């Protein structure tokens, strides 16, 4: 399969699965009571775990190599500070990108 | 582009209460749209970064319409992960919609099945949060609730589609030296902070981060699911113990 074919299979499969999850309780509204508390606890953990798993390697091991003091890690730290202070996605992304470009020039 | 935000009385022919509720919903989501723009742009950029085009970028945004899952899927597609891993990762990220679906169900139960399916398709973190807060506070009948919810969802949908197109087109002309892949990581980072609300979610994030970093050497795409399940498991254990100690 070409990369584009893989992408379209992914689009169809993720789209169908996501729609099923979104529709689940709205469609079965009359038949199902609610999500059991234990399952709610697990679902509540998903965003934090998923996002951390996506961010950490991109920042600490870019290109597969350990680089805890490299441009990406330091820029990530700067961005974390901005995200903490401003809670603004736009500011986080722009400052983080500027930081990584500048640090790339300075450190290499 | 966006729906009107004023509360002016609507024409009686259009169903005054429903139209008014729709406008109220649209007005309530407007301040949040600004925060959605960068993610939409990056959803478009990430597609071109992954070697895909405008068609695939918009395909994702129209068919899937879910920011974090789209970015994760494009990230994995770009690194050549197996299709099954791409799909499984995106779906796990979107499992949270089951919670929203359950929470919205009693409010929208009176709507026809086709309308509930539309409500399901346009479900987002933002529309859910704005609507459920309003439903808890204001007296509204069933049709007005549906109209309010769709009022929040319509500007979200339009903003997302337009930004995806802009991002995908811009992605083709941005100089290759700019680390746009890192922009995706930064977008995730800005979503991560609001997702960490207490000790169990902090433990989930920390565990997932450590496992993901250690698992980089494993075959493409196996590290992420492993890290996510470890994080969820640890966070879940803490949350369950806490819930048992403090009975609701």
Image (cartoon, coloured by chain):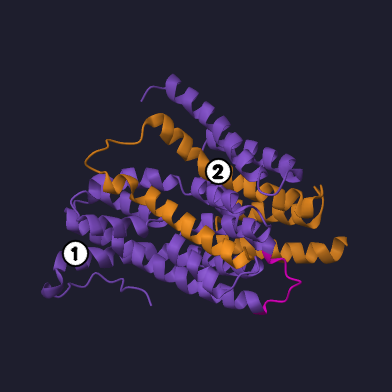
Chain colours: A orange, B purple
Q: Are discs 2 and 1 both within one chain?
A: no
Label 2, label 1: how far apart the Cα atoms are:
36 Å
Q: Chain of mark 1?
A: B
At label 1, counting other C-alpha atoms closer than 10 Å, the crowd grade (few under 14, some 14-19, many 20 or more) is: many
Residue B111, numbered label? none
Element carrying mark 1: helix
Return the residue at label 1. B18
- Residue shown at the point (63%, 45%) measured from the top left: B224
Name which residue lies at 36% across and 53% down.
B128
Task: Tell me which segment is drawn in magenta.
Answer: B173-180
Which x, y percent locates residue A69? 82, 50
Check residue B246 for magenta coloring. Answer: no
User: Residue B195 placed where, x, y %?
Assistant: 52, 45
Question: Where is residue B236 drawn, in percent x and y?
Answer: 51, 31
Q: Which residue is at 58% across, 78% downward?
A: B169
Residue closest to the eye, B78 or A68 = B78
Q: Which of the 4 image quarters holds residue B178? A: bottom right
Residue B42 falls left or right of residue A40? right
Farthest top residue in view: B245
- Main SS of the magenta segment? loop
Report the side of B182 relative to B194 (left or right): right
In this rendered view, identify the residue nearer to me: A11 or A89: A11
Cβ atoms at labels 2 and 1 below 8 Å apart = no
According to the picture, the residue beneath numbered tag 2 turns out to be: A48
């Amino acid at each position: 399969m070409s990369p584009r074919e893989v992408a379209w299979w992914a689009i169809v499969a993720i789209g169908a699965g996501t729609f099923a999850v979104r529709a689940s309780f709205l469609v079965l509204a009359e038949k199902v009571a609610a999500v059991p508390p234990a399952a709610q606890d697990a679902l509540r953990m998903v965003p934090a775990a998923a996002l951390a798993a996506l961010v950490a390697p991109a920042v600490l091991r870019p290109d597969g190599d350990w680089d805890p003091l490299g441009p990406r890690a330091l820029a990530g730290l700067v961005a974390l500070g901005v995200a903490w202070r401003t809670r603004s996605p736009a500011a986080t992304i722009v400052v983080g990108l500027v930081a990584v470009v500048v640090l790339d020039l300075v450190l290499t | 582009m966006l729906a009107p935000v004023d509360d002016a009385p609507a024409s009686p022919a259009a169903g005054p209460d429903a139209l008014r509720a729709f406008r109220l919903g649209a007005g309530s989501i407007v301040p949040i749209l600004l925060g959605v723009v960068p993610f939409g742009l990056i959803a478009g950029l990430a597609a071109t970064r992954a070697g895909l085009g405008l068609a695939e970028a918009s395909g994702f945004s129209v068919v899937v319409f879910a920011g974090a899952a789209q970015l994760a899927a494009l990230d994995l597609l770009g690194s050549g992960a197996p299709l099954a891993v791409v799909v499984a990762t995106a779906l796990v990220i979107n499992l949270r919609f089951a919670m929203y679906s359950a929470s919205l169900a009693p409010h929208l139960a009176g709507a026809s099945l086709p309308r509930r399916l539309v409500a399901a398709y346009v479900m987002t973190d933002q529309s859910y949060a704005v609507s459920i807060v309003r439903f808890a506070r204001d007296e509204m009948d069933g049709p007005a609730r549906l109209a309010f919810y769709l009022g929040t969802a319509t500007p979200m949908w339009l903003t997302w589609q337009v930004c995806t197109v802009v991002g995908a087109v811009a992605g083709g002309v941005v100089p290759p030296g700019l680390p746009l892949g890192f922009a995706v990581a930064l977008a995730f980072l800005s979503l991560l902070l609001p997702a960490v609300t207490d000790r169990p979610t902090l433990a989930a994030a920390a565990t997932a981060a450590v496992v993901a970093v250690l698992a980089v050497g494993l075959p493409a795409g196996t590290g992420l699911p492993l890290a996510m399940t470890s994080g969820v498991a640890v966070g879940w254990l803490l949350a369950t113990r806490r819930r048992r100690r403090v009975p609701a």
